[in-house]
Each structure stands twice: as C-alpha cells, then as structure tokens.
C-alpha cells in the first residue's frame, strides 16, 4: 500500500499558517506568495498532491486540490488555499468578515493506486469506507471524493452514486471503460475530530 511520511507538529502548523496567510492576503487583494522568511523543511519541499478544505461552523466553505503531483507540498498548499477561498465556483469568494471563523484542513494524498474492477458490485466490495479516497473515470468524465467524504456518505453504494453524479454521469452509470484509483490522505487541520 502506498504511504507517505507523517508530518511533525511544527510542519503541520507551518502548513496551516501558510494556508491562513494565503487566504488573508487574497482578501486584501494580493496574490499568493511565499514569504522570504518562510524557511521550508525538507519534508514540505517534496512533491505531493493535496486538497485544502475551508469550513465555517462545520459547513463546507470551499475545497480545491490537485490529484497530479506537479509541485512541492508547500507550493500545492499555497495554490490550493487561494483557489479554495476565491475560485471554488460553488461559493462566493471569502470576505474579510469571514477570516476569523474559517477552519482549515489540508489533506496530503498518498500516490494513487489503480483499482482493477470488473463490475459495480466488485468496486463496492473493494472500497474501504473511511480509508480510501476514490477517483472514478469513464467516458471522459472524472471525479474524486477524499476519504473524509465517508463521514457524510458512509455507505459504499451512496458514496459511489454521488461520485458519479459529481462526474456528470448518471448515479447508476457503469460501462466496461470505467477506471478507478484509490488513495489515502493525511489530514492536517484545525477542525476537532471528536
């Protein structure tokens, strides 16, 4: 099973500080930028895929990420924090009045692993609720749900139906061309998990 290292409390706080600062800069009309005094530990320089989730009072306020590993984790957090706050088309851009109430969660993804499936029943049997994120691709449509989505959609059938809808497909869509990948996530966040 693919894995990635855990991050120290200091490294986690550094990423959260970067996310908070990026959103605050964006509210002030400034582009995302890595401060010169920001000293980056080697673990955060490694290329990683990640998602940044913003919540207010436990409700989703924005979520953007990348599945492809195309930059360091620090750069991905910088970019995705800005995009989650100001470019998530489901929400208005974050305003100054919201800054104090936003909770940040960063999901650092393990490398994606292909999941060979022969049918919808086979896919449902192989899914690990609460553990796996899933990428579903078919007929030029692609979508993903992070492992944390299992908290809202805890039945594999429901998880899969909503994922297909997110991809722009019918809730019960299946074809021989379906491709799937799984991954896990290390959650770094301010949101209490109790």
Image (cartoon, helix red, strand yellow):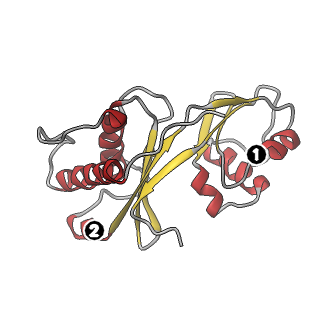
Name the quadrant of the N terminus: top right
> Residue shown at 52%/68% (left/top)?
193
Between 44 and 69, which is closer to the camera in this rendering?
Answer: 44
How far across and how far down the image is residue 134, in percent?
65, 42
- Residue 134 position (above or below residue 158): above
Between 16 and 61, which is closer to the camera in this rendering?
Answer: 16
Res 123 quadrant in image? top right
Q: Earlier in the sequence, mark 2 or mark 1?
A: 2
How far is mark 2 from mark 1, CA to CA? 37 Å
Local SS, label 1:
loop
> Residue shown at 47%/44% (left/top)?
6
Q: Which mark is residue 46?
A: none
Between marks 2 and 1 in the image, the one whose residue lies nearer the viewer: 1
Name the quadrant of the C terminus: bottom right
Res 41 quadrant in image? top left
Between 2 and 73, which is closer to the camera in this rendering?
Answer: 2
How far across and how far down the image is residue 176, in percent?
82, 27
Q: How crowded is mark 1: few (under 14 residues within 10 Å), some or many (20 or more)?
A: some
How far across and how far down the image is residue 120, in percent?
84, 41
How far across and how far down the image is residue 21, in percent?
21, 53
Residue under numbered circle 1: 127
- 31 horizontally vs 6: left or right: left
Q: Determine whether label 2 and label 1 are within 8 Å by CB.
A: no
Q: Residues within 10 Å of mark 2 (few under 14, many from 20)?
A: few
Residue under numbered circle 2: 98
């Amino acid at each position: 099973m693919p894995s990635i290292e855990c991050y120290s409390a200091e490294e986690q706080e550094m990423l959260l500080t970067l996310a908070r600062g990026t959103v605050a800069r964006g509210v002030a009309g400034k582009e995302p930028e890595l401060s010169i005094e920001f000293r980056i530990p080697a673990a955060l320089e490694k290329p990683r895929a990640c998602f940044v989730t913003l919540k207010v009072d436990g409700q989703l306020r924005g979520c953007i990420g990348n599945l492809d590993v195309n930059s360091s984790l620090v750069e991905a957090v910088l970019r995705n924090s800005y995009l989650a706050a100001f470019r998530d088309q489901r929400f208005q851009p974050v305003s100054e009045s919201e800054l104090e109430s936003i909770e940040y969660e960063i999901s650092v993804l393990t490398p994606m692993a292909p999941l060979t499936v022969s049918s919808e029943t086979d896919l449902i049997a192989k899914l690990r609720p609460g553990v796996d994120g899933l990428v579903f691709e078919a007929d030029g449509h692609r979508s993903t749900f992070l492992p944390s989505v299992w908290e809202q959609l805890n039945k594999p059938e429901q998880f899969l139906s909503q994922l297909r809808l997110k991809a722009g497909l019918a809730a019960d869509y299946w074809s021989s061309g379906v491709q799937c990948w799984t991954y896990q996530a290390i959650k770094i966040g301010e949101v209490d998990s109790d």
